[in-house]
Image: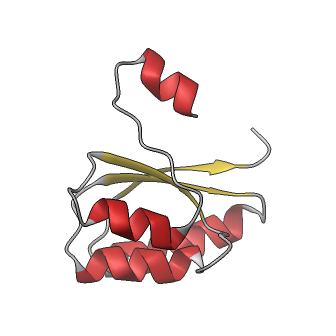
Amino acid sequence: MRDAAQSFGFDVRVVSSANGFMELYDHGEPSVIVMDIFMPDMDGIELLIWLGDRQCTSHIVLMSGHGPQYLKSATNIASARGVRIVGTLSKPF
């Protein structure tokens, strides 16, 4: 994902945990967020709620290897919180 985004000219920051993301987010909201629903220290749904509480305006792409229904549910929860999901990716892709 990083290589693809960089090839299109994006300035990419990669973190491997929700806590790391939240620290980075506090320094400036990204224009695009690509995130997996399952993370080691926080569920992706919790992070989407956290983003909604901060009135996040980023374009978000969700990924999951647990099936399209889970992605649909996460999208619905995010949308109810005002978070903009612009796409989903089912893994593997």
Could you tell whether 87 is left or right of 58 in the image?
Answer: right
Q: Residue at x 20, y 56 (%)?
A: 28
Give the total number of marks visible in the rendering: 0
Residue 24 drawn above or below residue 59: below
Quarter of the rendering containing residue 1: top right
Residue drawn at x 57%, y 66% is 17
Q: Position of residue 67 (x, y in %)?
A: 76, 63
Task: Please tell me which residue lies in front, 37 or 67.
Answer: 37
Give percent across and percent down for residue 27: 22, 59
Identify the residue at horizontal 36%, vertical 72% (top origin): 79
Q: Residue at x 34, y 19 (%)?
A: 9
Query: Residue 78 at x, y = what percent?
Result: 40, 74
Using the image, determine if residue 39 lies above or below residue 27. Answer: below
Left or right of 35 in this view: 50: left
Image quadrant assignment for residue 85: bottom left
Counting from the top left corner in percent of width and height, residue 30 is at 28, 50
Q: Is residue 88 above or below residue 43?
A: above
Coloration mode: secondary structure
> Which residue in the rendered view is the most extreme toward the top?
7
Along the line of sight, which residue is nearer the eye, 74 or 46? 46
Q: Quadrant of the C terminus?
A: top right
31 is higher (above) or lower (below) than 11: below
